């Protein structure tokens, strides 16, 4: 089975050192899609960066691991890119409800959330008390994207504040999605002795 490259796609303000995405990068060698401006996200700019990182894999199958606004980015990218064949699977964690007035006012240009079926296997992980999206809305997103939905209960926005640590449960869902797409995740964890978490 071909080993995929894994890209993490953080949301607004990025993911700090205690965020599970940062931990996975340190533990497994996953590569972060770095944005030029984490605090003032422009959908077109973020979309271009994601496209560049996917193309940098030189045709290798890619698996995406997105959190929050990163999920909206993956959906927007998939609706417009001609290179979606390069992505085999995606884990979409805590997608925000960009139709809400408070989020629409802060994230200009991101509404409406793209709700088009994704052309790759995907799993949405949602929390029942996420302050940025109700579970009902998360179910709607998953249905529109053609994604499986996992409800992990009341764990907030599924970020560093949720205290998830290395979050092995979510990594198992990632491995399951990759397997369903006939690709494998990197098997040997990267040594954390010399790998920073930032």
Image (tube, rainbow, N blue to C red):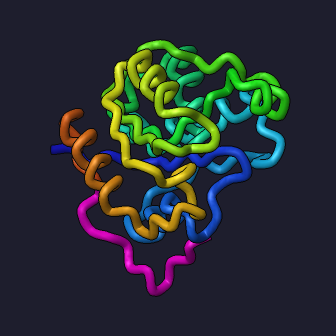
Residue 27 in view of the camera: yes
Q: What is the magenta range?
A: 186-198
Which image quadrant: the C terminus? bottom right
Residue 14 coordinates in the image, percent (x, y): 67, 53
Q: How many labels sit on residues?
A: 0
Q: Is residue 180 left or right of residue 19?
A: left
| Front in this rendered view, residue 155 or 117 | 155
Which residue appears farthest toward the bottom when viewing the image? 193
Q: Is residue 145 left or right of residue 162?
A: left
| Front in this rendered view, residue 93 or 184 | 93
Residue plotted at (68% across, 21% down): 99
| Front in this rendered view, residue 84 or 18 | 18
In the image, residue 28 lies in the stretch drawn in magenta: no
Type of secondary structure dominating the magenta stretch: loop
Q: Is residue 22 above or below residue 148?
A: below
Residue plotted at (59% across, 48% down): 10
Residue 125 coordinates in the image, percent (x, y): 41, 41
User: Image quarter for residue 197?
Assistant: bottom right
Q: Is residue 158 above or below residue 90?
A: below
Q: Is residue 146 above or below residue 21?
A: above
Which residue appears farthest toward the left when viewing the image? 1
Q: Is residue 25 left or right of residue 77?
A: left
Residue 185 coordinates in the image, percent (x, y): 28, 52
Residue plotted at (78% across, 22% down): 109
Which image quadrant: the N terminus? top left
């Amino acid at each position: 089975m071909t080993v995929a490259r894994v890209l993490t796609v953080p949301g607004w303000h990025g993911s700090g050192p205690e965020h599970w995405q940062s931990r996975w990068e340190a533990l497994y060698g996953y590569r972060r899609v770095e944005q030029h401006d984490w605090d003032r996200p422009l959908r077109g700019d973020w979309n271009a960066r994601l496209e560049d990182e996917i193309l940098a894999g030189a045709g290798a199958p890619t698996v995406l691991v997105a959190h929050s606004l990163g999920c909206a980015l993956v959906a927007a990218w998939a609706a417009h890119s001609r290179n979606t064949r390069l992505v085999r699977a995606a884990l979409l964690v805590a997608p925000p409800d960009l139709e809400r007035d408070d989020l629409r006012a802060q994230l200009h240009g991101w509404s409406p959330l793209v709700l088009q079926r994704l052309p790759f296997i995907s799993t949405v992980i949602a929390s029942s008390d996420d302050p940025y999206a109700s579970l009902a809305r998360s179910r709607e997103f998953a249905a529109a994207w053609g994604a499986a939905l996992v409800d992990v209960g009341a764990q907030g926005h599924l970020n560093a504040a949720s205290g998830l640590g290395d979050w092995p449960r979510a990594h198992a869902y990632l491995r399951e999605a990759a397997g369903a797409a006939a690709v494998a995740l990197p098997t040997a964890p990267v040594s954390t002795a010399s790998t920073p978490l930032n």
